[in-house]
Image (cartoon, grey):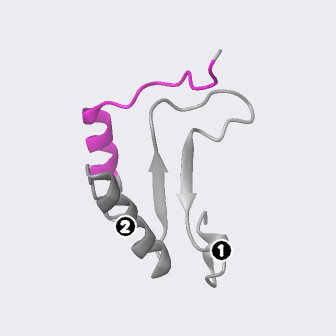
Amino acid sequence: LSPYLGPMPTDVSMKEATEWASPWIEVDTIRDEKERIDMMVEEIASGGVIALYGGRSELGPRALGHRSILADPRKKGIGSIHQ
């Protein structure tokens, strides 16, 4: 049994979510895996923060959502990005 029982994101739901958040975030869709990884490394190295997800979300009281926030923890202020 998989914990990833949440809804599967659709192109429409992703577009709506990124449009809603556009004042606060920059969204790049990069299909080429090497190019995407290189861009993520560069973003984190320059002090940026990356939100990443794939597929269905987790459900349950301790679910992390099958989502990740990636950043360099050595950068000042990074521990307060959730505020």
User: On the picture, is 5 further left or further right than 29?
Assistant: right
71 or 78, nearer to the observer: 71
Q: Residues within 10 Å of mark 1 (few under 14, many from 20)?
A: few
Task: Give amino acid for label 2.
Answer: Asp
Q: Which residue was labeled with disc 2?
A: 38
Q: Is residue 60 visible?
A: yes
- Kind of element beneath mark 2: helix
Quadrant in the picture for the N terminus: top right
Q: Which residues are magenta?
A: 2-20
Q: Position of residue 2 (x, y in %)?
A: 62, 20
- Distance of mark 1 from mark 2, alpha carbons? 19 Å
Residue at (41, 26) in percent of width and height: 8
The numbered disc on residue 73 is: 1
The residue positioned farthest toward the front in the image shown? 34
5 within the magenta span: yes
Tell me if 71 is positioned left or right of 50 in this view.
right
Question: Which of 73 and 9 lies nearest the eye of the viewer?
Answer: 73
| Label 1: which secondary element | loop
Earlier residue among tags 1 and 2:
2
Q: Is residue 50 magenta?
A: no
Q: Residues within 10 Å of mark 2 (few under 14, many from 20)?
A: few
**Where residue 20 sits in the image (x, y, percent)?**
32, 51
